[in-house]
Each structure stands twice: as C-alpha cells, then as structure tokens.
Amino acid sequence: MKRRRYNNAKCFKLGESMSALAKLRDVQSSDYNPTNRYFEIQNRRYLGNKNALLSFIQSVVTEKCADYTSFCDIFSGTGVVGNHFNTPNVKIISNDILKSNYVSLSTFLESVDLELRRISHLIDGLNKLPMMPCNYFAEHFSNTFFTEVNASKIGTIRDGIDCLGVPETEKNALITSLLYAADKVANTCGHYDAFVKHLDKEQVIRLLAPKVKAQCNQNNEVYNEDANLLIKKINCDVLYLDPPYNSRQYSDAYHLLENLVTWKKPEVFGKAKKMDRTHIKSKYCMNSAPQAFADLIAYADCKHILLSYNNTGDSKGGRSNARITDEQIFETLNKRGKVQVFEQEYRAFTTGKSSKDGNVERLFYCKVQK
C-alpha cells in the first residue's frame, strides 16, 4: 500500500489562516483578556486512574513517610498522583513511556513560566481556525472514534499547532489542550481499543486552557523514559509505583492519542486504526513483568517504596490476570526492607469487560533499609 503524504502548505492551505497564526504567536499576553474556561489534570478518562484513591494514598504517605522532600511517580499515566503531592516544598519526579502522557506531565508538573493569558489567546485562535477536511486525522479517524466534523477539526488544529512555531513549553501546553479536548468528544469508553457504534453528533470539540500550578513546579523533573532505565539515574525520598497490572498494553489502549501527539502520520491498520507500537510496549504487561519489577526495586535509591497493585489476580478473564503475583511482590520488596499492605475497596475504571465486584486496591509499603 502506497503511503499518502500530507503537505501542510498544499493540502492544509492555511493561507490567510497562516498569517493569523503568526500574529497569534507574536501577541503579548498583556494584550489579551482570556475568556476560555480551564481544565485540570484529572479531567481525562484513563484506565487505572488513581484520582478516586488519592486520599487513600495520602493517608499511607502521611503515616509512613515523614519529612519527605521528594516524590517520584515513575509510572505516571495522567500524573494525578504526582500532582496531588506537588507543593513548593516537595520535588516531584514524574515519568511515563508514552509521549501522549509526557506532554501533559510536562505542562502540568514542569512548566514554570507558562503564561496562561497567552496560552488562552493561542487556544482561542486555534478554536477559530477554518476547518480543512483534507488532513491525515480526518481521513483515518472520521466516523469511527470521532464524528467527521470533530476529526477534521482535530487534524486542522494539530497541523495549526505545528504551524505556530512556538517554544516547546507552549507547544506541549497546546497539544495537551487538544488531547484533553479530543478525549472529551471521543466515541469510546475511555480507551481506543474500540469505538462505540452510535456517534454523538451534538458535541463539537473545543479546546480549553490547562490550569497549571506553576509556583509548585520550580524543582520538578519530568521524563519520557523506560522506568527501568530511569530508576538508575534518579534518587528520591518516596518512590511510588503504579505499573500496568495485566496484559492490556497502554500503548494499545491509547495508540490514537500517541499518534496525535507525535504527529508522524504513520500508516495505520485494523479496525481500530493502530500504528506500529513495538517501541512503547511495556515489559510489565508480559511474562517478563516479575523480573522487570525485581530489577527496578534492586536499583531504587529511595527511603520509602509504595506499590499500587490491585487484586486482579482473582479475575475471570485471562488478559486481566495480574502479571506479578503477591508472592513475587513480597519476595522482591522484602529484599529491601519490611513490607506492609494497606487495602481499600473501590470501583475501578476498566475496559468494561472485567467484573468490578470486590475490586480492592492494595498499597504495598516498604521502609527501605540501608
């Protein structure tokens, strides 16, 4: 199959819109009175999202991790856990292997000089871009994960962001805005392994501005790396781990958003329109998970280890079975110190195929012995 090439100048034909984007780029934030509403880091659907469990995690940290000044969330996902502990007195180290998560983490947890008035102005301009149906995203994702109108607008806005030529910090914020807005209008149950049959033709995508706590981000670090490689380069007081629990790869569930963020316009295949994801497959979803976990813990330079791992080992579905057994968890953590387990029942956000009855989130705590 011959790959189709998309030329922004020819197919996108911004013309006067290009000039308008250039004017947006050069605007001074003091010249603009923002009218956009804001979105926050937790306003996104994501498998395994810990937003509902933050008070539980906080209670264990408060009880066990006194006087910590650094907190590492090395499998961050949306970043809600790191964001919860993000204060001017605590350094947050945040990491995720997916670029679609990294741009959001960088925006919310690393930005220190992001001018929200200016970002709001840029977003206002992007929202008003004339829709150009001849774009990569519209061709591949119309009338599947998105309506034809929303797919066309998403592709138009994503090309427009590249045309702006703004600094990386601002570009990440604009892409994050698009990612969250796309998630809100997607015809899915919160992931992109499949789409629902009946399209919602009423809701049209609209970008909002990210609400960033820049005053808390002065010492933070954000990474887009394999956790097992990053662990050898960092140190922290509290190491929080929330790895994938089962064989369901996050690169499969969020391939579309990864495609939208990286914007390399690759060939896609199958009913779900996935691109090649071999470079972002997680070892924690494979039979290698116990060894990967053991290697990570062995290199951890920290005072406290917290591991979130729920009870999917009792699931009826093979793909939902936990990749690391409780015995393997205890065996690995006991090599570093005494282990305690805290539990809380909750209703998990899943793919919709697993039973939600009796779902228990466990937090394994290890006081590291030097």
Image (tube, rainbow, N blue to C red):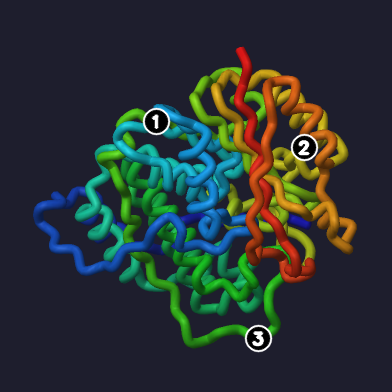
Residue 316 drawn above or below residue 64: below
Looking at the rendering, in which quadrant would you find the C terminus?
A: top right
Residue nearest the viewer, comparing 212 with 300: 300
Taking 186 as reference, is 132 left or right? left
Please state the horizontal and vertical placement of residue 192, each as a whole percent of the image.
67, 64
Q: Secondary structure at mark 1?
A: strand
Residue farthest to the top?
370
Residue nearest the viewer, comparing 143 with 330: 330
Residue at x 33% of width, y 37% of height: 217
Residue nearest the viewer, comparing 129 with 316: 316
**Amino acid found under the numbered disc labelled 3:** His
Residue at x 48% of width, y 87% of height: 202
**Badge 3 or badge 2: first in the primary sequence:** 3
Q: Which residue is mark 1?
A: 91
Q: Is residue 332 visible?
A: yes
**Amino acid found under the numbered disc labelled 1:** Lys
Q: Which residue is mark 2?
A: 283
Q: Are marks 2 and 1 in contact (CB under 8 Å)?
A: no
**Amino acid found under the numbered disc labelled 2:** Lys
Distance from the alpha carbon under mark 3 to that under mark 2: 35 Å
Q: Secondary structure at mark 3?
A: loop
Residue at x 45% of width, y 30% of height: 66
**Badge 3 or badge 1: first in the primary sequence:** 1
**Badge 2 or badge 1: first in the primary sequence:** 1
Q: Is residue 272 visible?
A: no
Q: Are marks 3 and 1 in contact (CB under 8 Å)?
A: no
Distance from the alpha carbon under mark 2 to that under mark 1: 28 Å
Distance from the alpha carbon under mark 3 to that under mark 1: 45 Å
